[in-house]
Amino acid sequence: MSGPHRVNTATGRRPARSVQQRLMVAVLSIVLVVWGFAFVATWYDTEHEVGELLDAHLSLAATLLLSQPLDALPHAQVRELPNLHDDQRRVVMQVWHDDQLVLKSVAAPHAPMVSRGQAGFAQVRIGQVDWRVFSVSGYDGHVVVQVAEQVKSRRDVVLANLRSVAYPMFIALPLLVMGVWMAVRHALRPLYDLGQRVTQRSPDDSAPLPDGEVPAEVQALVGALNRLFGRMARMIESERRFTADAAHELRTPLAAVRMQAQVAQGALDDAERDTALAAVVQGCDRAAHLVDQLLQLARLENQVDVAESVCSVRAVARSLGADLSGVAEQRGQELRWSCGGAREVTEAFGDVDTCPLPEGLLRILLRNLVDNALRYSPAGAKVHVSCLALPEKRASLCIEDSGPGLPPDAVQRLGERFFRVVGSGQPGSGLGWSIVRRIAAQYGLGVSVGRSQALGGLSVTVSWVQVDSERVEA
């Protein structure tokens, strides 16, 4: 199919009309309706005014005739007024004296046009012609004057007046259509230009669209597009960083696994082979942990909308405490929970048991912080996790350890991707703090790092505005 109603062969649907077509149809429809109403109103008004004017002429002519000495006219014969003009036949008159016709115009009938006892205006049909008649009597009722005009003549006058009005309106209508089309096209030009700019952009172009030249109605659209381009740019950059980070960080553990596997292949005794295989397993665990952290960070960076959810800190802490207690026991460390953990269930929370995070994200955040405290604290160290109520309806999670702590310059760099403190002697990727910072930034949590007054090591406090505990699912 061709023309404006062509069908999209891919979807089987007709394309939606453009904004310009919608505006043209709407504006021209309104113009035509208003034009039609104006024309009809002009018709009725002209017909009314012309009718009143011609009725006044009829009554004036009858009054002038009645002012003449008509009672002196002879009754023996009917006098006819001479025909001085061709259009004179459209207006006729009769003079009756004592029921006798004594005077008439050339085209007037001999019979009364209306009953001689009827006064005022009337509309009658004589033969095939409709007449507007005015009748008046005088001389104590002895003389009756009847003056009439063809209704067709009145209509001709009305049509002549309407033609003088309608011709300019009909001539102006196509000019009006052209003007509306040009005005609509000019008003929509910024939309056409915006569409061209978006169409001509390369896939990797994330520069914002200029919004200074577009109308106020389009600025909201341009702003939404710019925000979309910004999110797309961040997502693309996140994917690139993820690919580069994964390739960079996985190279080392995979090389170590390969080396230990080669050692196991060439081992001369069972003890050497078992040692190499244990190193292979350790390297696989490290690579799996690194991949898990990279995936977590990538999901957080690609997340656009913040989920509206809350969870029970006590329930998450209890579950996580059961998972990490074994790790602490293997290192001879003391892991104590004041959050309802598996090893020590307390009611320290009271009304600060809820956190404005989905349960999965709170688990990731808390696990990274506690895992770092265990990892970088020596054997026999203490790690305490507690939840406290703060002023102004705020709550906090505090993770403290008795480890060596961090120097001030290292504290400032916490959260940088792959940053690790030199000389710690512990394996890791440096992504745990990046994940914590990202979650905190998305959900408006405060994260502060300092020295623990109770244990002497590092102290990390995560604070948030307390939410309604009724929103937490049982």
Image (cartoon, grey):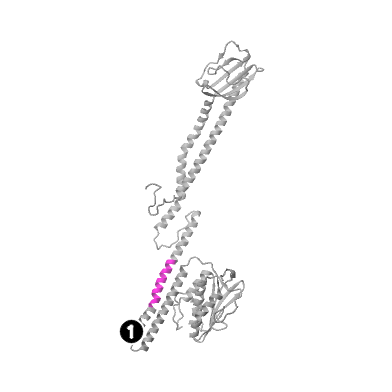
Secondary structure category for the residue under label 1: helix
Does residue 206 appear to the left or right of 317 in the view shown? left
- The image shows residue 164 at horizontal and vertical percentages of 50, 32
In this rendered view, identify the residue nearer to me: 98 or 418. 98
Does residue 141 appear to the left or right of 366 in the view shown? right
Residue at image mark 1: 265
Image quarter in which the C terminus is found? bottom right
Q: Quadrant of residue 55?
A: top right
Kindly tell me whether residue 409 is visible in this rendering: no
Q: Quadrant of residue 390?
A: bottom right
Mark 1 is on which residue type?
Gln
In this rendered view, identify the residue nearer to me: 90 or 115. 115
Q: Is residue 82 magenta?
A: no
Extreme-top residue of the structure:
76
In this rendered view, identify the residue nearer to me: 300 or 332. 332
- The image shows residue 296 at horizontal and vertical percentages of 46, 72
Q: Is residue 250 magenta?
A: yes
Q: Which residues are magenta?
A: 235-251
Residue at screen point 52% across, 23% down: 129
- The image shows residue 182 at horizontal and vertical percentages of 45, 46
Count of residue discs = 1
In this rendered view, identify the residue nearer to me: 29 or 167. 29
Residue at screen point 59% across, 79% down: 346
Q: Residues within 10 Å of mark 1 (few under 14, many from 20)?
A: few
- The image shows residue 32 at horizontal and vertical percentages of 49, 41
Residue at screen point 51% across, 74% down: 363
Kindly tell me whether residue 470 is visible in this rendering: yes
> Can you say whether 136 is above or below 466 in the image?
above
